[in-house]
């Protein structure tokens, strides 16, 4: 059976404007809430950052994926990709539907560039099988992206049944 799903994908740049001058995460939450989407794929989500908490008075106390989910998206998954002294960031999937399972896989192509693939299975009412949702943030170089696409294809072959619906979204 075919069920319409409304999705969005957005690289939120850690909830900051260009050059990290202005906090944009509150505007993002308002806009995401008004989109009417079922599933949102986010890249560069700040899971935690101790220094920014002090620099921006309105910096959310909870991780950005939880803050952005608000009261609209009742389910979310976060895949931590890059860890540093003051915090970490990664990919997130927000959903109005139940997330049955999720796993984050490291698909970094280089030691200096941490990237991940967040794979969720989501139960959508009216569908016989879960929807597989994969959120990726590919690297900057062509060679790295080629390697990452091979890793994504291998995961799809191994983990997603041929008859299952698949949504691949992210920052390509």
Image: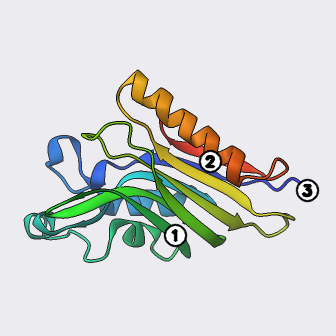
Q: Position of residue 78 (x, y in %)?
A: 44, 65
The residue lying toward the viewer, choosing from 79 and 125, is 79
Dot 3, crowdedness within 10 Å: few (<14), some or many (≥20)?
few
Residue 36 seen by the camera: no
The residue at 62%/70% (across/down) is: 101
The residue lying toward the viewer, choosing from 31 and 63, is 63
The residue at 66%/53% (across/down) is: 6
Q: Alpha carbon of mark 1 to alpha carbon of mark 3: how far?
A: 25 Å
Where residue 1 is drawn, which disc sits there?
3
First reached walking from the N terminus: tag 2 or tag 1: 1
Where residue 155 is drawn, which disc sits there?
2
Where residue 76 is drawn, which disc sits there?
1
Dot 2, crowdedness within 10 Å: few (<14), some or many (≥20)?
some
The residue lying toward the viewer, choosing from 79 and 111, is 111
Where residue 119 is drawn, which disc sits there?
none
Foreground mark, 2 or 1, reads 2
Q: Are marks 2 and 1 in contact (CB under 8 Å)?
A: no
The residue at 85%/67% (across/down) is: 126
Q: Position of residue 34 (x, y in %)?
A: 52, 60
Q: Alpha carbon of mark 2 to alpha carbon of mark 1: how far?
A: 21 Å
Q: Secondary structure at mark 2?
A: helix
Rendered image quadrant of residue 49? bottom left
The residue at 68%/65% (across/down) is: 122
Numbered-mark total: 3
Residue 113 seen by the camera: yes
Q: Secondary structure at mark 3?
A: loop
Q: Position of residue 133 (x, y in %)?
A: 63, 54
First reached walking from the N terminus: tag 2 or tag 3: 3
First reached walking from the N terminus: tag 1 or tag 3: 3
The residue lying toward the viewer, choosing from 34 and 156, is 156
């Amino acid at each position: 059976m075919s069920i319409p799903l409304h999705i969005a994908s957005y690289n939120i740049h850690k909830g900051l404007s260009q050059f990290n001058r202005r906090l944009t995460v509150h505007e993002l939450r308002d806009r995401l809430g008004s989109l009417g989407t079922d599933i949102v794929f986010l890249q560069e989500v700040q899971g935690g950052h101790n220094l920014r908490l002090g620099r921006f008075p309105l910096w959310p106390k909870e991780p950005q994926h939880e803050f952005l989910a608000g009261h609209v998206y009742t389910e979310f998954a976060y895949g931590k990709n890059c860890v540093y002294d003051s915090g970490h960031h990664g990919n997130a999937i927000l959903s109005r539907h139940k997330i049955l399972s999720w796993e984050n896989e490291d698909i970094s192509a280089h030691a200096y560039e941490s990237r991940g693939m967040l794979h969720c299975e989501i139960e959508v009412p009216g569908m016989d099988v879960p929807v597989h949702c994969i959120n990726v943030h590919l690297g900057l170089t062509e060679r790295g992206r080629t390697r990452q696409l091979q890793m994504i294809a291998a995961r799809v072959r191994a983990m997603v049944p041929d008859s299952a619906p698949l949504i691949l979204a992210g920052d390509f």
